[in-house]
Image (tube, rainbow, N blue to C red):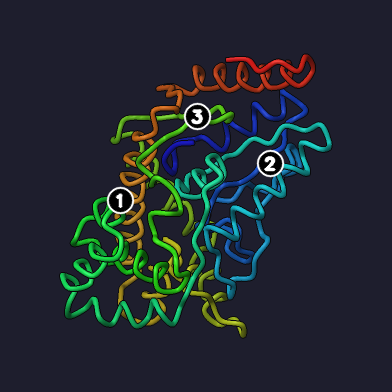
Amino acid sequence: MGTTASGKSALAIDVAEIQGDVEIVSVDSMAVYREMDIATAKPTAAQRRRVPHHLIDILDPADECTVSLFQSMALHAMAALEDQGRIPLLVGGTGLYHRSIIDRLEIPGQYPEVRRSLEQRSVDNLKGLYEELANKDPLAASRIEPSNARRVVRALEVIEGSGRLFSSYGPGLRRYGETSVCQIGLRHDSSFVEAAIEARVLGWLDEGLLDEAAGLRGRAGGMSRTASQAIGYREMFEHLDGALSLDEAVAATIRRTRNLARRQRSWFARDPRVLWFDDPESARAGLMDALEAVAVSRTTGAVGD
C-alpha cells in the first residue's frame, strides 16, 4: 500500500513474478471499471500477462461500486486463490477498501431514499441532525465531527434504514485490532510524490485521456455517480462541457491527485500495523520476506511473525 504514484504497483508486479505462486488482487475503487484505463493507472496488458490480476475491469461505468460490493468480490477472489494454493497479494491505494478486507468490516446497508431526505435536511440544519444523532446513538456521535455532514447523514441513514445503532456495526475505523494480513507500505517524501503525479497526469494526455473521456461522455449507458467522479475523468468532462480550458482541467487534475495522495498518506499512517519502507529496494526485500513467510506457513502449518 501507499499513495498514488508511489511505485507500489510496479514493485508488487516484479515481486509477484519472481515469487511465482502469487496473484494480485487490485484494491482500487476506479480500476474496477471497464473503459476507464488511462487515468486509473491500471496495469498494462503486458504487466497482466506477467502476473494475473483480479478485480480489474469487472464493472460497467454505469454501475455503482460500494464498499460492501467490493469487499464481497475481494474476499471471494482471495478464497478462490487460496483454494488453488496461490497467495493473494492486495495492491492499491483505496484505504477503506483495504480495511474492509483486512478487518472483515461489517458494512451497513445503503438506503438511498433515507439518505436523500437527510442530505436535504443537512443543508439548512446540520447542527440539528447532529443533535438528533447524539440522542439516538451517543457513541456514534462521539466518533463523528459535528461539521462532517457526510458522516452525520450516513450514521442517521443507517439507524433509520436498518433499525440498528450505527455504532453496533463495529468499533470504528480508528481502532485497529489484530489481523493475519501482513501490510507493507512504500512511502516517499511529498516532493517526490508531487513531481511523480505531475509527470503521470501529463503522460495521460499523451496516452489519449481526452479522447477516452469523450468516449465515456457519449456512451449510451451513462456513468454512475461513483465512476463520474474519478479524478482525471471528472476534469476532462468539465473541459468537454466548456467549464474549464484544457490547461485548467490538467491543473485541476494535478491538484486533486495531490490532495488524494495527502489523504492516502494520512489514512495509511494511522494504521500501526503497517510496516513502512522508505525506498523501493527495502520495500521489495520486505515484501519478498513476507510472501516467503506465507508460503512456509502454508507448508508447515505454522504462522510466522
Residue bearing mark 3: 178
Alpha-carbon span between mark 1 and mark 3: 30 Å
> Dot 3 surroundings within 10 Å: few (below 14), some, or many (20 or more)?
few
Label ID, residue 259: 1
In terms of sequence position, does the residue under pointer 1 or pointer 2 come before the other? 2
Compute the Cα span from label 3 to label 2: 33 Å
Name the residue located 77 percent from the left edge and 27 percent from the top edge.
20
Residues 202 and 116: in front is 116
Where is the C terminus found, in terms of image quarters? top right
Q: Amino acid at mark 3?
A: Glu
Q: Position of residue 266 (x, y in %)?
A: 31, 40
Mark 2: which secondary structure?
A: helix
Q: Quadrant of residue 299?
A: top right
Residue depth check, mark 1 versus mark 3: number of the one nearer the observer: 3
- The residue positioned farthest toward the right in the image shown: 84
Q: Position of residue 33 (x, y in %)?
A: 60, 63
Residue at image x 21%, y 66%?
Answer: 130
How dense is the environment of label 1, judged by Cα within 10 Å: few (below 14), some, or many (20 and up)? few
Tell me: 244 left or right of 298. Answer: left
User: x, y percentage for residue 89?
Assistant: 64, 35
> Residue 162 at x, y = what percent?
47, 69
Mark carried by residue 192 = none
Circles 1 and 2, Cβ within 8 Å, touching? The answer is: no
Q: In terms of sequence position, does the residue under pointer 1 or pointer 3 come before the other? A: 3
Q: Are marks 1 and 3 in contact (CB under 8 Å)?
A: no
The nearer-to-camera label among 3 and 2 is 3
Q: Earlier in the sequence, mark 3 or mark 2?
A: 2
Label 1 vs label 2, nearer the camera? 1
Residue under the image location 68 percent in, 61 percent down: 58
Q: Amino acid at mark 2?
A: Gln
The front one of 209 and 140 is 140
